[in-house]
């Protein structure tokens, strides 16, 4: 398998603009081809300004948000109003500012018991796609932590390889989270990793340069044309570029 595409931007602002344009283009194209699009959102600081830009008329070719279904790759076990909620961040930055039908917003129920929330979300995904095989989202956004985690899959996380959604314990915080697993993450038609900051440089270099890297982010191994890493110059500081 070829290495993934890596696009490096001079700063976080340039990354925000380029990512917003790529996401918009992919959603518009998918809606034209399929009449609807499925978008998996990620949490963290890097995507928030992207969501804010997507909510503005930054392009002459607007997204028909009524045809987009929103999902989440992971969630903390908190209420939607908690400042740590991934859903809450995306709602405030994007969903509350666009015309999106309530039934198109498929959030993880972080306020529930983690195991119950995971089982409920897996069922919701299966009911939505209703087809054989592994469900395939049209566009999946992911981030990566300085420890190489992605979604809520941490270096210490153990998961059932046959499950799409799991509940897991995060030893660093003692909290529980709900997360998609590589089984369904890798099935997405388009995957964009969004990484910014010098604190991510070591993990990024491991994932992209070391075939033996065992960070969870390295388990996202979609084909070359489907997986793109969009990173700022600080995060890419340890990559050797031609």
Image: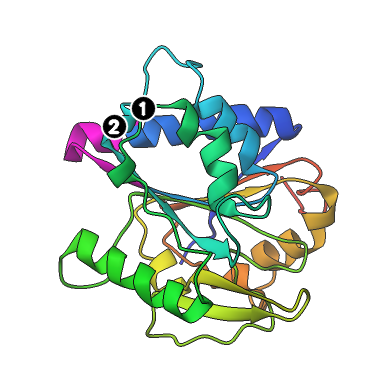
Percent x, y of residue 69: 32, 45
Q: Seen from this angle, which residue lies furthest left? A: 131
Dot placed on the residue nearer the N-terminal end, 2 or 1: 2
Of 49 and 75, the residue lying toward us: 75
Query: Which quadrant of the figure contains the C terminus?
Result: top right
Asked if 150 appears above or below 68 in the picture, the reply is below
Q: Quick one: label 1, few (<14), some, or many (20+) residues within 10 Å?
A: few
The colour scheme used here is rainbow
Majority SS type along the magenta span: helix
Residue at x-position 42% and y-position 27%: 98
Query: Residue 207's quadrant in the figure?
Result: bottom right
Percent x, y of residue 131: 15, 66
Helix, strand or loop at mark 2 = helix
Of 87 and 199, the residue lying toward us: 87
Percent x, y of residue 21: 49, 28
* Left or right of residue 176: residue 40: left
Of 221 and 151, the residue lying toward us: 151
Percent x, y of residue 68: 31, 39
Q: Quick one: label 2, few (<14), some, or many (20+) residues within 10 Å?
A: some
Helix, strand or loop at mark 1 = loop
Residue at x-position 23% and y-position 40%: 36
Magenta-colored stretch includes residue 88: no
Residue at x-position 46% and y-position 88%: 160
Q: Mark 2 points at which residue?
A: 66
* Left or right of residue 78: residue 61: left
Labelled pair 2, 1 in contact (Cβ < 8 Å)? yes
Specify start and end residues of the magenta stretch as a single range: 28-38
Asked if 31 appears above or below 222 in the picture, the reply is above
Q: Mark 1 points at which residue?
A: 99
Residue 229 shows in the view:
no
Magenta-colored stretch includes residue 36: yes
* Left or right of residue 162: residue 201: right
């Amino acid at each position: 398998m070829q290495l993934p595409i890596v696009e490096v931007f001079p700063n976080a602002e340039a990354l925000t603009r380029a990512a917003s344009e790529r996401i918009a283009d992919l959603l518009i194209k998918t809606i034209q081809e399929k009449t609807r699009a499925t978008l998996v959102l990620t949490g963290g600081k890097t995507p928030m300004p992207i969501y804010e830009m997507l909510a503005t008329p930054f392009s002459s070719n607007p997204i028909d948000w009524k045809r987009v279904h929103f999902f989440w790759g992971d969630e903390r076990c908190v209420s939607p109003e908690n400042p740590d909620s991934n859903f809450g961040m995306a709602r405030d930055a994007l969903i509350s500012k666009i015309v999106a039908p309530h039934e198109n917003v498929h959030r993880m129920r972080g306020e529930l018991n983690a195991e119950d929330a995971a089982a409920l979300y897996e069922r919701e995904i299966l009911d939505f796609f209703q087809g054989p095989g592994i469900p395939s989202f049209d566009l999946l956004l992911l981030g990566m932590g300085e420890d190489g985690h992605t979604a809520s899959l941490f270096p210490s996380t153990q998961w059932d390889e046959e499950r799409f959604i799991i509940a897991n314990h995060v030893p660093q915080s003692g909290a529980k989270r709900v997360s998609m697993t590589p089984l369904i993450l890798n099935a997405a038609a388009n995957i964009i990793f969004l990484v910014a900051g010098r604190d991510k440089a070591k993990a990024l270099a491991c994932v992209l340069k070391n075939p033996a890297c065992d960070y969870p982010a390295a388990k996202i191994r979609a084909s070359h044309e489907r997986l793109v890493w969009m990173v700022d110059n600080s995060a890419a500081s340890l990559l050797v570029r031609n």
